[in-house]
Image (cartoon, helix red, strand yellow):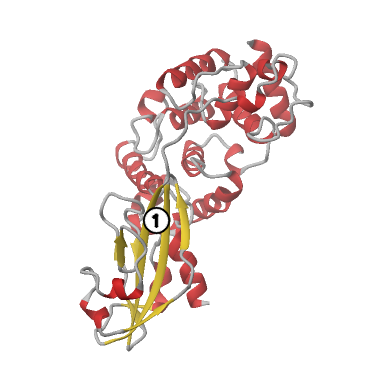
Amino acid sequence: MKRFSTKLLGWYALHKRTLPWRQTKDPYLVWLSEIMLQQTRVAQGLPYFERFWNDFPTVHDIAKASEDAVLKHWQGLGYYSRARNLHKAAKLVSEQYNGNFPSTFEELINLPGVGPYTASAIASICFDQVCAVVDGNVYRVLARHFDIDSPINQPTGIKTFQALAQTLIDSKSPGAYNQAIMEFGALHCTPKKPSCTTCPLNDSCLAYVHGRVAERPVKIKAKPVRKRYFHYLIPIDQNNNTLLSKRDHKDIWQGLYEFPLIEAQNMLSVDALQAHDDVPKWAKAAHWTKFQEEAVIHKLSHQALHTYFYLIENIDETLPISWASVSDYAVPRLIERFLDKFIR
């Protein structure tokens, strides 16, 4: 077991990427990076991290900001519940801990949006607590090295890997070890085409020895993708103003803004859409233009949104939002992409 951690730490010393949150033990920056990198690649998350750090240099600054401001900064990263929980956790740390993050796993895990992985990462990296992290990279490395066939998305498998990870962690350098095994999975022991022949652990990797690298880790098939059919109405009044509203219900994109939406059981023709019960009165006598001929398919986790955008012009009513200010609102990536095409 000691040999495993020693080799990983040696590999990490030679190959680790230079990233801003690795230059510090400041729990604010480590927390910010870990929340952002949940379900987000480093290359995508890095510019968001730098922008947040610049605009919100301390946890107090996030706490003082409005939720809309935080969501606007988060726009494009997806999984917006992370941003809402980030804001809630910042308020809690700012108000109850005077801006000082708690130092134990048990306290950290009580922060909104912080689960076992994030609590372990902060506790080990910032406070040298011997708490092993287990994320997708760690699952893959351990499943292959020890040739484990327990499903990583089932309770028994999760317990198996967590217990094993805890026995392997280097007690003298827990933070460095946790970063090493995650980095090793991200760069070397990758999901596809791992660098097995040059791997420093290949002489003890059981999946490599038995030819089962491609079969590890084992994961029970995910639930089927749900198809949803969105029809966005883009109203434009005589003054070139439009209309946005906040999604307050507990569904995707809670707290973000969108144009008037009609969701149906299938894609509707223009005639069927105009006759729909939910069409606003201001759209009834207006001029309709379909913005694109083919539906935009926007993929989320376990959902596929088949979407059409309709320009609704010559509206008699006065609408509240000028097109110049639309960019001030936090919107889903799907709508951001529409705006990029429509405005430019």
Q: Write the residue at 48% across / 50% down.
A: 57
In-image side of 33 versus 17 (left or right):
left
Residue 239's place in the image compared with 117, above or below, is: below
Q: Quadrant where the N terminus lies?
A: top right
Label 1, secondary structure: give it: helix
Q: Write the residue at 31% across / 50% down.
A: 251
In-image side of 243 versus 160 (left or right):
left
Residue 207's place in the image compared with 48, above or below, is: above
Q: Point out residue 48 in the picture as x, y percentages from the top left corner.
A: 53, 53
Q: Write the residue at 55% across / 25% down.
A: 139
Q: Residue furthest top?
A: 1
Q: Point out residue 148 in the picture as x, y percentages from the top left corner.
A: 57, 17
- Nearest the viewer among 279 and 108 is 279
- Nearest the viewer among 109 and 191 is 191
Q: Point out residue 76 in the picture as x, y percentages from the top left corner.
A: 48, 56
- Nearest the viewer among 183 and 190 is 190
Q: Write the residue at 69% across / 16% down.
A: 210
Q: Circle 1: is it few (<14), some (14-19), or many (20+) Cα within 10 Å?
A: many
Question: Which three-letter amino acid code belongs to the residue tagged 1?
Answer: Leu
**Number of marks in the rendered image:** 1
Q: Is residue 130 visible?
A: no
In-image side of 315 versus 172 (left or right):
left
Q: Residue furthest right?
A: 198
* Pointer 1 residue: 71
Residue 228's place in the image compared with 95, above or below, is: below
Q: Is residue 220 visible?
A: yes
Please identify the quarter of the rendering in which residue 19 is found: top right
Please identify the quarter of the rendering in which residue 190 is found: top right
In-image side of 238 versus 342 (left or right):
left
Q: Point out residue 165 in the picture as x, y percentages from the top left corner.
A: 53, 18
